[in-house]
Image (tube, rainbow, N blue to C red):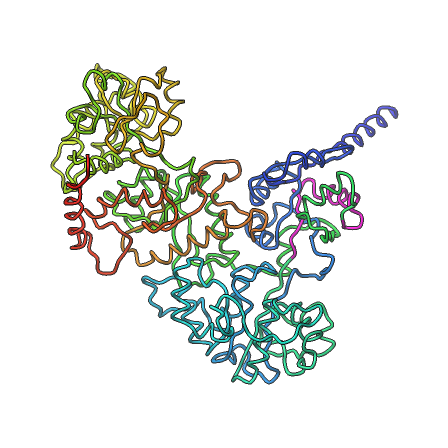
Amino acid sequence: MGFKLVFLFSCLVAAVSAQTYRVCVSTAVSSSTCQSISRDDSQVTCQRVESRVDCALKLAAGQADLGYFSEEETLLLSQQQPNDNRVLATVRDESKLDPYAFETVAVVPANHTRGLDGLSGGVYCHPGLDESDLRWSPRVLKNLEQLAARTDRCPEANTAGKTAEELEVETLSKYFSSGCRPGAWSNNVTVDADLKSRYPSLCSRCGPDSGCSRYTIDMGVSIANVRNENRHIQALECLRTNANASSAVAYVAWQHVVEYFTIRNPQDSPSFAVLCPNGTLASLTTAVLSNTISPCAFIRQPWGAIVANTNNAAALLTSLKTWWPAGSSPATGWQSTLFSVVTGGSSSARVVFQDSPISLLNYTSAIRTISNIDSTASCMPARRWCTISTLEQTKCNWVRVSAHTLGVQPSIACQQRNSVLECLNDIKDDRADFISAPSNYGYLARQHYKLTPVKLVQNSPDDASRVAAFVKESAVISSNVTRYENLRGKNACFPESGGLAYMSFVRVGQERGVLSSSECDYAAAVGEFFGGACAPGAIDASHALSESSSFNSSVLCSSCRTSVNINGNNSTCAWDYTNMYFGNNGTLACLNDPNNDVAFLNTRSMATHLTSLGLQATQFRALCRNNSLAATTGISIDDNCLLAYVVDAEIVTRRNDPQYNSLNTLLDSLDTYFGYNAASGNQLINLEIFSPFNENKNLLFKDSTIGLTEASLSSSHEPARNYIELFRHLQACTGTAPPIAGLANRSFYSIVTLLTMAIMTRFVIY
């Protein structure tokens, strides 16, 4: 029996020592790095993740064991996963091993009175909203002004047509007499420029020719170990030179206060004090300035942390202490590679271990807390994001709390529906505010649901939507179908009624003069031109192409066929896969029907669809937008032959919504903080809004999205400009442009534009 116990104990020890831990690494980490981590006697392997938020989800699900999270991410996780995982250590810098990543303080003249209220009418010196040195979030950057000027409380403000940034700056300009608040006031460049032109007092202390983008004040001589170009040092100099004003304040990091008053201007320290949140003053004595911790702070920031899933936390803490006994890189071996991957590759990184694993909530709450999103005051109403699945709702909630953690305004609310069309209807009826909808719904969103784009997505060239027209080679030979005029009376195939391909034909038909440019009923325009068609959904109320049309749209379903023959009747107009000819694959099947002649469809995956249908590319020839046939048969055509080269999605909201501008700038902020504008590893919160989420694709945005752009012909993104151009005629018919004060749906401008377009069409060269 004794031998058996010894044997079992030995097996148990061996099993424990053989434990393999999965460390989260980004998809950008090379395979060779992961191989180095797993070399020799390593107990660690790579677990690739799309983002650090994905890592948190995998830790909680037991699919990963270890990961690093930034300062702001620890605050996010304390809200989203307060007790799911455990903090093992913090990651600091060898030059700054203080208890906090930073402390924000308000420095005022030593004779300041009346606490925060005493700042009213004074000079405001700020390091800048674009200051990235200490990784301050918008919430941190604006904390003092929110507490002093109450920029989050504006009960009497008229928010219609305004942005959160405008209300904020308007309040600040009334509270402070002057100041320097450099950097971007809005992530929308147009709004930013407008605000700075209207509220110049908040730029007046930045110095000559600053453009409110930086300080240009005279900083005097350079002092060793103090950088004159540091924005916090410049803000303190702004305070010093304006100390004789009725009141003045610099909102800066404590570490730079110490630098400024101990190295650069020690003689001035008796003239200034730290203003505490409770209104008291703390003099800048030698003892105070020699302390790495401020006497009082508005915000103290927790360090970024190494976090483990709860089950393996204790064992991992022991292992990490063994692998990195000094809290630094051991210089060689897999342990060194692991250290570099976990801590971000900085040679000055230092790991400070916890005595024992601690929950995220307990770790952050002792240092800094974020107010509950549902009880936080705001001038702007939350924008309601419509989601269409449980997975989307989950991702939306993470985006919502991430944005709240950073202090992005307005806030976001997430509400789930069952489909894109349900969301479009809810937005129309003011039960939701926006959704990123596939561009295939562009016509329905505008015509049927009375919506308008607030942003368009940007796609890489390979991911943009390409629409083309293909005719049977047999029709080219037997019926001489070589131009759009030759299609009159023929049978056509579309993936869906009112979809992108349908709209592309309407636009080209108007250009070529085969469809009337004065006709706003697109069902009648297409139905009267072709002898028959399959445009799935044409007779469904949700796809109505005109509210007042008397046209019998059934002709647009005459070529459709059901996948299930019921009682000898195989006709259908369903806009799902019970209709054999629904969607791109179905459109090719429709074209293969001997009775049909031409198909309009997205060229994506066309070769795959042909193979699945047993068809050959040589059976078809493209009919180009310029009214010529492609030189050869096949589906490989250049972009000049396309009917449309456009974005694959757009973000839509209600026409004339008074919060349109607020939503527009919110989306710019989401793009800035969670899009590809920020380097993946350097985001304050590494949540990739355009990427897969927890290995699930196309949630909130298609994975093909690389950014957002204005819904304007002036967009720098060609597919976006093309998409707006595609709907210009519809916009002229219905007035679906973004909100313009006083512009009715069928405005005089729209009518004139429609007539002008009709006249211009006559001069198109065929």
Q: Quadrant of residue 705?
A: top left
Q: Which residues are magenta?
A: 303-328
- Residue 189 position, x and y percent, is 42, 59
Say whether residue 323 is magenta. Answer: yes
Residue 45 in sight here: yes
Q: Is residue 313 left or right of residue 623?
A: right
Q: Is residue 276 above or below residue 335?
A: below
479 w.r.t. 640: above or below:
above
Identify the residue at the far left of this view: 550
The residue drawn where x is 31% and y is 32% is 641
Residue 4 x, y percent position in the rendering:
84, 24
Q: Could you tell me residue 293's position as x and y percent?
A: 69, 68
Whether 183 is among the magenta residues is no
In the displayed structure, would residue 455 be above or below residue 40? below
Q: 445 or 740, which is in the foreground? A: 740
State which quadrant residue 283 falls in: bottom right
In the rendering, at what x and y percent does residue 545 appear?
A: 20, 38
Would residue 615 be found to the left or right of residue 323 on screen?
left
339 or 348: which is nearer to us?
A: 348
Who's the residue at 59% across and 81% down the image? 109
Q: Nearer the viewer, residue 28 or 576?
A: 28
Which quadrant of the structure image shows residue 567? top left
Quadrant of the rendering where the N terminus is positioned: top right
Quadrant where the C terminus lies?
Answer: top left
Q: How many marks?
A: 0
Q: Is 639 displayed left or right of 681 in the figure?
A: left
Q: Is residue 433 visible in this depiction of the protein? A: no
